[in-house]
């Protein structure tokens, strides 16, 4: 019998322990598992190390709420909405430590973790100051065949990977709509010890069987699957909905000041008891419909 | 948000348009480019070059959507709104990074919060690393792609001594490294070809690989550039040319087809 | 740029002495129409890279085109060993450089990524590794003490792949995207030649860009070849032709039967239609048709 991996947000978030290294899907304003991020803040998790390629608002929220104390990755930015100022303050104050990686170094470190290798090499980083900062994890090594040196990126096995996708069945087989595939989904869940997936909808396995080529993650690597409509909001979930500019701007404004930051976290994260209350708080169906990108339909 | 960039005296266009056209003319038909975040000027340049002199030019929007032809350029150059009209949505780790590492893509444009005379860039911290005055986003793929891609183009819409510095606070991406043959000694292909700013165009002196004044935008003097640059600018002997004027057709295509909403001006806020 | 070429023109991109990588896996998706043209033009001294293959390698060996095979596994699976490959290797006419699948993939990836080597745990403790110390070497990570195999780049001159469709610019669609290791050979190769079941308008690729497998700038020539994987399969359109494999193996048992078989059923037929007619025609098409 196939194991039922369905869980509530609270149950899924409880797979993350204080101090864990958490690989978080996200590409600037796109496709972050925001519902789990909010739940981790609500549950008051502490000292998380967040692994990300190009992280945006989820890291800024977690920095603001004090749930993270290190970032391991490539960059943290909300792109056109500007720097993540709460994250920035955390780093400048010494509350958040950064393990500086490039994108290929993130992929190589997680890829080595996924393949049970001590390291994977990259051609990147050479000649930059990222080498030498963290010799435990990034090191210029000689080619055993006498060629030119490469950068060995030490295996990184996150405690948990958290990703958001379009649909799954109750066994945790995860399927994407036709879309660009960022590195997160292909690599993070394969490297991590535990995997949490949120999806726009949970469907019968029969629905997945119609297009098996669109299944990107088999259920056997997934520990919890949670149905969360608009679960990436305020980041985008192409082609279902775009990122929420108004929400990003509201956050940027609130994040300028400690008091308004707390008010924002209370109103949108700590007080809404579930996804429906959260969606009401951010403007309800009117907001959600405005985010849907009809031209792609 | 977007402000109105300055008029270029006598050229019938604004500085953002001159920068786009100048960069566009640098792109040959064999260009295979892609873009990262907040890259409005190069994105416009690729789209314009494809419409004028480089029909075979390859551009992967957001490094994902190959041959995209968006009706307008959105607020983010990493967002899906840039992908309309693509003939392929590639898978980032298995398609994009494989092809970037193998230099199948040959052209990359980037800017940094700081740049030095050798075209190295910083997008990581201002001030000491352990006690930063400003924590910047981080280099993202810059440390990778600056090593992998042979034709590097730099641009800046803020030509001032804070951007063009004598010494970077952190080297997040490599240009010509310490200059001379440093890049070659590291086994890295090619290097920076040019830097297009809101005041001038730099190329790189072939021996030292230091930025050298190649042309001045109309109304800008050599002393203006010197005053706005934190390192000694190499100035070749003789008259410094004025950056060539865009054709009417280039300006029309840019305004009407490539970027009708003026997203490129977001880089001047 | 129009990348469409005839099969003959496309096959001529494989020069004598070249290293040629063959796509597909075992009985699936091999670029047989291109391979047949290479045999027909009597290419010589090829190094053939095929991770897991059967019939394409056997045709090339039977045609006298091959001096070396770099591979993981060459067979017809349940339909027997690849007879010419086996005989030529036993006679010492063709050299074999054997790898495990993943060490070979790592060698192709190292070439594609411009890296001096790719590490893997595949092959540790086997005889495979010490057979070619110039290309695979047992190493130990100094910081963790873990053992691994470092695999050197394997540069490929030409990759040959078969796909479902292309546009005239050379965008290629394998749909559903069952490409096994084809991505690795395309990324490692200087030149990529694809055969396709059909050419579609470019607008079809724009309408569904997520279905594109290789972008135009990775592809140098596209040749239309309906049933271009025959007698191997092209999922989900047609299956492999078991009868062809059986007849082929049977014919090799007798030299005169073989000469006749080779001429009439493999190299003699001029076009794809002639090839299919020589091998059962409509009955064969019905036989190998798959329920979608």
Image (spheres, coloured by chain):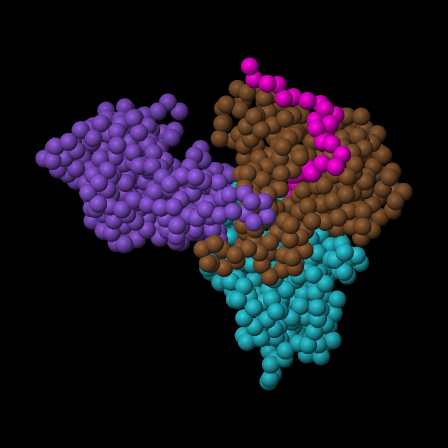
Chain colours: A brown, B cyan, C purple
Towards the viewer: A206 or A188: A188
Left or right: where A40 falls relative to C36: right
Q: Is the stretch drawn in magenta largely helix, strand or loop?
A: loop
Left or right, A238 with respect to C274, comes to right
Residue C279 position in % (x across, y down): 20, 30
Q: Which residues are magenta?
A: A1-29
Decide if residue C116 is in sight here. Answer: yes
Q: Residue at x 69, y 49 (%)?
A: A99
Question: Which residue lies at the image location 49% right of the left edge and 55% below the top edge?
Answer: A143
Q: Is residue A11 on the magenta stretch?
A: yes
Q: Quadrant of residue B43?
A: bottom right
Residue C65 within the segment the image draws in magenta: no
Residue most extreme to the left: C256
Indicate the quadrant where residue C200 lies: top left
Instruction: Identify the residue shown where x is 43% and y is 48%.
Output: C137
x%, y% of residue A190? Answer: 57, 35
- Measured as percent of width and height from the top left, residue C156 is found at 37, 51
Asked whether, in this view, residue B78 is left or right of residue A49, the answer is: left
Furthest toward the right, the residue is A259
**Foreground residue among A203 and A189:** A189
Quadrant where the N terminus of chain C sits is: bottom left
In the rendered image, which quarter contains the C terminus of chain C? top left
Residue B108 visible somewhere in the drawing: no
Frontmost residue, B16 versus C284: C284
How many discs mark residues in the rendered view? 0
Furthest toward the top, the residue is A1
Image x and y of residue A130, in percent: 65, 56
The residue at the point 83 percent across, 45 percent down is A255
């Amino acid at each position: 019998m196939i194991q039922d991996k369905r869980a509530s947000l609270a149950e899924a978030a409880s797979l993350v322990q204080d101090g864990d290294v958490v690989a978080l899907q996200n590409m600037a304003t796109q496709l972050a598992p925001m519902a789990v991020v909010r739940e981790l803040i609500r549950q008051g998790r502490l000292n998380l190390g967040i692994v990300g390629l190009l992280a945006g608002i989820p890291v800024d929220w977690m920095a603001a709420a004090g749930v993270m104390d290190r970032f391991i990755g490539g960059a943290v930015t909300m792109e056109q909405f500007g720097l993540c100022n709460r994250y920035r303050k955390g780093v400048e104050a010494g509350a958040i430590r950064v393990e500086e990686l490039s994108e290929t170094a993130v992929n190589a470190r997680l890829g080595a973790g996924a393949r049970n290798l001590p390291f994977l090499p990259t051609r990147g980083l050479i000649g930059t100051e990222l080498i030498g900062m963290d010799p435990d994890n990034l090191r210029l090594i000689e080619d055993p065949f006498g060629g030119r040196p490469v950068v060995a990126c030490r295996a990184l096995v996150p405690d948990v990977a958290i990703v958001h996708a379009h649909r799954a069945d109750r066994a945790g087989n995860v399927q994407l709509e036709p879309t660009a595939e960022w590195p997160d989904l292909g690599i993070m869940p394969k490297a991590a010890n535990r995997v949490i997936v949120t999806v726009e909808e949970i469907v019968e396995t029969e629905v997945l069987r119609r297009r098996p080529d669109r299944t990107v993650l088999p259920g056997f690597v997934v520990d919890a699957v949670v149905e969360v409509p608009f679960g990436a909001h305020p980041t985008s979930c192409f082609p279902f909905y775009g990122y929420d500019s108004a929400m990003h701007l509201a956050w940027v404004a609130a994040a300028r000041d400690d008091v308004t930051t707390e008010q924002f976290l209370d109103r949108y994260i700590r007080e809404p008891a579930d996804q429906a209350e959260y969606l009401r708080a951010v403007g309800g169906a009117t907001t959600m419909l405005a985010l849907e990108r009809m031209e792609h339909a | 948000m977007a402000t109105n960039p300055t008029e270029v005296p006598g050229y019938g266009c604004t500085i953002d348009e001159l920068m786009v056209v100048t960069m566009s003319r640098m792109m040959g038909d064999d260009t295979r480019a892609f873009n990262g975040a907040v890259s409005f000027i190069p994105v416009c340049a690729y789209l314009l070059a494809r419409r004028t002199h480089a029909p075979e030019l390859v551009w992967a929007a957001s490094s994902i959507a190959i041959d995209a032809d968006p009706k307008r350029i959105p607020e983010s150059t990493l967002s899906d709104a840039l992908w309309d009209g693509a003939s392929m949505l590639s898978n980032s780790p298995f398609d994009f990074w494989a092809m970037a590492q193998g230099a199948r893509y040959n052209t990359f444009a980037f800017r940094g919060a700081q740049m030095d005379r050798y075209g190295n860039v910083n997008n990581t911290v201002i001030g000491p690393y352990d006690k930063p005055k400003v924590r910047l986003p981080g280099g993202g793929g810059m440390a990778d792609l600056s090593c992998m891609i042979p034709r590097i183009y730099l641009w800046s819409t803020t030509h001032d001594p804070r951007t063009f510095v004598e010494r970077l606070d952190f080297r997040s991406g490599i240009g010509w490294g310490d200059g001379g043959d440093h890049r070659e000694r590291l086994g890295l292909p090619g290097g920076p070809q040019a830097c297009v700013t809101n005041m001038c165009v730099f190329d790189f002196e072939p021996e030292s690989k230091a930025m050298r004044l190649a042309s001045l935008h109309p109304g800008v003097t050599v002393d203006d550039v010197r005053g706005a640059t934190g390192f000694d600018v190499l100035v070749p002997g003789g008259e410094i040319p004025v950056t060539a004027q865009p054709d009417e057709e280039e300006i029309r295509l840019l305004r009407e087809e490539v970027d009708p909403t003026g997203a490129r001006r977001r880089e001047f806020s | 740029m129009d990348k469409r070429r005839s099969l003959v023109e496309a096959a001529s991109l494989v020069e004598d002495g070249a290293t040629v990588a063959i796509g597909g896996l075992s009985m699936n998706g091999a670029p047989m129409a291109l391979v047949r043209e290479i045999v027909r033009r009597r290419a010589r001294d090829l190094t053939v890279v095929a991770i897991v293959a059967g019939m394409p390698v056997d045709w090339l060996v039977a045609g006298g085109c091959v001096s070396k095979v770099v591979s993981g596994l060459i067979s017809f699976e349940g339909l027997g060993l690849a007879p010419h490959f086996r005989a030529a290797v036993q006679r010492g006419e063709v050299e074999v450089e054997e790898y495990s699948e993943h060490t070979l993939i790592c060698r192709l990836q190292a070439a594609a990524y411009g890296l001096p080597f790719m590490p893997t745990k595949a092959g540790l403790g086997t005889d495979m590794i010490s057979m070619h110390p110039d290309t695979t070497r047992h190493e130990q990570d100094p910081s963790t003490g873990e053992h691994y195999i470092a695999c050197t780049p394997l540069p490929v001159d030409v990759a040959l792949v078969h796909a479902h469709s292309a546009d005239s610019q050379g965008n290629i669609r394998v749909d559903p995207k069952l490409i096994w290791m084809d991505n690795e050979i395309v990324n490692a190769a200087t030149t990529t030649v694809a055969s396709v079941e059909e050419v579609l308008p470019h607008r079809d690729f724009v309408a569904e860009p997520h279905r594109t497998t290789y972008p135009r700038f990775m592809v140098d020539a596209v040749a239309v070849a309906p049933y271009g994987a025959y007698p191997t399969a092209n999922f989900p359109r047609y299956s492999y032709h078991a009868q062809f494999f059986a007849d082929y193996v049977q014919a090799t048992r007798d030299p005169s039967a073989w000469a006749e078989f080779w001429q009439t059923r493999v190299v003699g037929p001029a076009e794809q239609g002639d090839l299919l007619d020589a091998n059962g025609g409509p009955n064969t098409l019905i036989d190998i048709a798959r329920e979608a």
